[in-house]
Amino acid sequence: EGKGGGGAVFLGFAKRRLPRIRPTLLEQTGVAALRFDFPGRRMQLSPVPLIGWREDALRLIDLRPRGTPIANYACRVERLVVNGCLVPLDRPCVAVIDTGTTGLSVSEDLYDSGILPVPVREAQIEMRTERGGVAVLEASVR
């Protein structure tokens, strides 16, 4: 009832949560890091960090202060390209990386804004890395 997932079961790979949410599977383990190899169909759970201090990475944003019940794996979006068209973003935009989502979800505000080419057939999400590089996530209906 208006608690943003207070009654949901978060079996997923969230490690941190708001106090009103039941403990997640991952926080009850000694897992410190996880890695997904989607093409290889492998997942690695590790008790130690998997990203060395010399490696480049995406900085995660904690959305819990904005009301999400768990610490999603969220990153700031630098550019969003939908159906080959650059979407002009007039406010900060984040991508939530969710291994349990097999699609693209956008906020109702962005969908209703008229700037998003619909129907979405393909999308590229560009994110700046900690060292200034660009990481790109791509999705397509093909």
Image (spheres, helix red, strand yellow):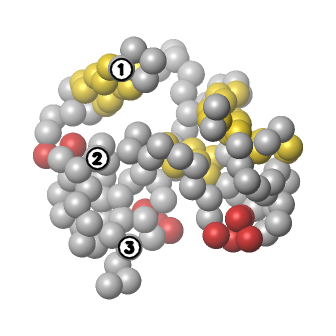
Of residues 97 and 103, the one nearer the viewer is: 103
Q: Amino acid at mark 2?
A: Gly
Q: Which mark is residue 100?
A: none
User: Which residue is most to the bottom?
Assistant: 1
Of residues 136 and 58, the one nearer the viewer is: 136
Q: Amino acid at mark 1?
A: Arg
**For the point 14% across and 39% down, which residue is it?**
29
Please tell me whether residue 140 is drawn above or below residue 41 in the rendered image.
Answer: below
Do callouts 3 and 1 mark residues in contact (Cβ within 8 Å)?
no
Residue 23 falls left or right of residue 44:
left
Q: Quadrant of residue 17?
A: bottom left
Q: Amino acid at mark 3?
A: Gly
Residue 65 is situated, as x and y percent measured from the top left of the image, at 46, 66
The residue that mark 2 highlights is 12
Residue 74 is situated, as x and y percent measured from the top left of the image, at 51, 47
The residue that mark 1 highlights is 41
**For the point 41% across and 20% down, which residue is it?**
37
Q: Could you tell which of marks 3 and 1 lies nearer the N-terminus? A: 3
Q: Nearer the viewer, mark 2 or mark 1?
A: 1
Residue 115 falls left or right of residue 12:
right
Of residues 116 and 92, the one nearer the viewer is: 116
Q: Which mark is residue 4?
A: 3
The crowd level at tag 3 (other Cα within 10 Å; few <14, some 14-19, many 20+) is few
Which secondary structure, mark 1? loop
**Alpha carbon distance from label 2 to label 1:** 17 Å
Residue 60 is situated, as x and y percent measured from the top left of the image, at 51, 43
Q: Quadrant of residue 43?
A: top left
Residue 98 is situated, as x and y percent measured from the top left of the image, at 44, 44
Residue 85 falls left or right of residue 5:
right
